[in-house]
Image (cartoon, rainbow, N blue to C red):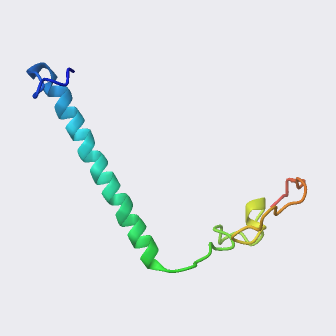
Amino acid sequence: MPCHIPDYPDAYAGWNALSSFGSYISIVGIHHFFVVVAITSRSGKNQKCAESPWVVEQNPTILEWLVQSPPAFHSFGELPVVKETKS
């Protein structure tokens, strides 16, 4: 589109409406993002994750739940051997 034309031709009206609709969706999404960030920052400070989200299971079998939250830097010195366990 040349920059010297002050208005779009009627042939571009549909694309202009679609572009405007997409920008409104983006504005609503950005607004929701900042609302979630504000609610999260006010809800509590320095809360850690639960030891295991699988409350029913007493012995977690995956490595992510065997370390503390937040995990220490280089939690495993070498690759751990994962064996299948029978429950």
Q: Residue 10 in the image: x percent, y percent?
A: 9, 22
Q: Residue 3 in the image: x percent, y percent?
A: 19, 25
Q: Residue 8 in the image: x percent, y percent?
A: 12, 25
Q: Place residue 63 in its image quadrant.
A: bottom right
Quarter of the figure that contains the N terminus = top left
All told, the count of numbered labels is: 0
Identity of the residue drawn at 27% across and 46% down:
25
Q: Residue 12 in the image: x percent, y percent?
A: 16, 23
Q: 87 or 40: which is nearer to us?
A: 40
Quarter of the figure that contains the C terminus = bottom right
Residue found farthest to the front: 4
Identity of the residue drawn at 23% across and 34% down:
19
Relative height, residue 78 to residue 60 (above, below):
above
Identity of the residue drawn at 65% across and 67% down:
54
**Image side of residue 62 versus residue 78, left or right:** left
**Image side of residue 78 versus residue 21, left or right:** right
Relative height, residue 17 to residue 11 (above, below):
below
**Image side of residue 75 versus residue 4, left or right:** right
Relative height, residue 67 to residue 12 (above, below):
below
**Image side of residue 7 versus residue 67, left or right:** left
Identity of the residue drawn at 35% across and 65% down:
35
Q: 28 or 3: which is nearer to us?
A: 3
Relative height, residue 52 to residue 24 (above, below):
below
